[in-house]
Image: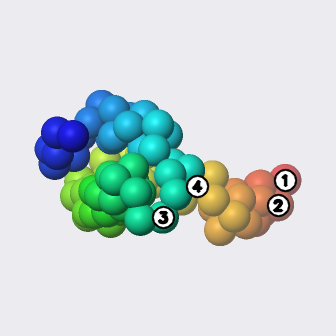
Amino acid sequence: MNIKPIRNDEDLRTECKRLERVYQASEGTPGADEMEIHVTLIEAYEHKPFPIGLADPVEAYAYFLFSSHGRVIISFYELCIN
């Protein structure tokens, strides 16, 4: 068994395939130990925070306009001009 850290989504897919091979191993067997290692690596990667950059101001404004609050404002504006 070759243990490597999961650094990207491709590594994650590879690790999931390895987990599938030993998923139903009986407790106390080397396969069960390997399964536990794979699960621990996958959980550690999935709980790792990924930074999210700031939104583009135009995209943020467009999101607001199409959210429920934006529809209320647009509907109110349409009522005023009609």
Identity of the amino acid at label 4?
Leu
- Front of the two marks 2 and 4: 4
Task: Identify which residue is drawn at 69% across, 64% down.
Answer: 68
Residue holding disc 1: 82
Residue holding disc 4: 65
Task: Identify which residue is drawn at 15% across, 44% down.
Answer: 4
N-terminal-most mark, 4 or 3: 3
N-terminal-most mark, 1 or 3: 3
Measure the alpha-carbon separation of dots 4 and 1.
20 Å
Identity of the amino acid at label 1?
Asn
Measure the alpha-carbon separation of dots 2 and 1.
5 Å
At label 4, counting other C-alpha atoms closer than 10 Å, the crowd grade (few under 14, some 14-19, many 20 or more) is some
Residue holding disc 3: 27
Measure the alpha-carbon separation of dots 2 and 4.
16 Å
Percent x, y of residue 27: 48, 64
Asked which quadrant contains residue 39, the reply is: bottom left
How many marks overall? 4
Do callouts 2 and 1 mark residues in contact (Cβ within 8 Å)? yes
N-terminal-most mark, 4 or 1: 4
Measure the alpha-carbon separation of dots 1 and 3.
72 Å
